[in-house]
Image (tube, rainbow, N blue to C red):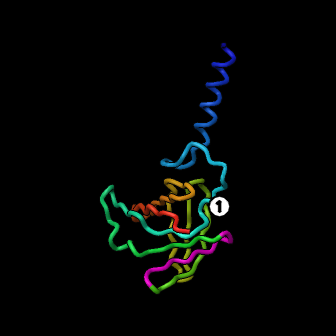
Amino acid sequence: MKQFALFSLLLVLTLGACKKYPDSPMISFIPRAERIEGKWKVKEVLYNDVDSTIPYKLHIWEFTRNQSVIRQVLQTKELGFWTTGNQDSDFIVEMDSGERTIYEIRRLKRKEFWIKDRKTQLEFRLENIK
């Protein structure tokens, strides 16, 4: 019985350490890059927990396996690349125009991707559409 209790405690501590992002599941067997890959539309944008979605509602971001990004607003497309940073939660998007944004990954699931701009504090809640 003591061994089972010890094993259970170690399992809980180990799984607790697997959670990388504040609002993400405890563990995922799908690699981070594979979860990021896809076409995403803005579901919601928050600033200090206040809805700020309207100006971003038509934004679509596509992140590819080779780390390129296409940001589209209506018929205008911008190209760039994405990467992860020194911290597990860093997500960096650099557009060809020179615009560079560092986000904190808040949630990363196959169908949900929440990122918070470290500078403006805007939190983008994206949903996968492809």
Q: How many marks?
A: 1
The one of 85 and 38 positioned closer to us in this rendering: 38
Which residue does the numbered mark 1 point to in the structure image? Answer: 34
Q: Residue at x 63, y 25 (%)?
A: 8
Q: Residue furthest front?
A: 130
Residue positioned most to the bottom: 75
Q: Which residue sits furthest left? A: 50
Counting other residues with Cα less than 10 Å from the Cα at mark 1, is it few (<14), some (14-19), or many (20 or more)?
few
Looking at the picture, tell me which residue is in the foreground, 22 or 31. Answer: 31
Q: Name the residue at the top extreme.
A: 1
Q: Position of residue 9 (x, y in %)?
A: 61, 25
Q: Quadrant of the C terminus?
A: bottom right
Quadrant assignment, res 121: bottom left
Against 96, residue 109 (above or below) is above
Where is residue 59? Give x, y as percent: 44, 74
Q: Residue at x 52, y 57 (%)?
A: 105
Q: Is residue 51 above or below residue 7?
A: below
- Nearer to the camera, 69 or 103: 69
Q: Residue at x 57, y 44 (%)?
A: 19
- Residue 55 point in image, percent of width and height: 34, 74
**Is residue 24 part of the magenta span, yes or no?**
no
Which stretch did the figure color magenta?
65-74
From the top left corner, tell me how far across and down residue 80 is, in percent.
58, 78
Magenta-highlighted stretch: main secondary structure?
strand
User: Can you say whether 27 is above or below 55 in the image?
Assistant: above
Q: Secondary structure at mark 1?
A: helix
Dividing the picture into quadrants, the one containing residue 44 is: bottom left
Amino acid type shown at disc 1: Glu
Q: Split into 4 quadrants, where in the image is the N terminus? A: top right
> Against 77, is 128 above or below?
above
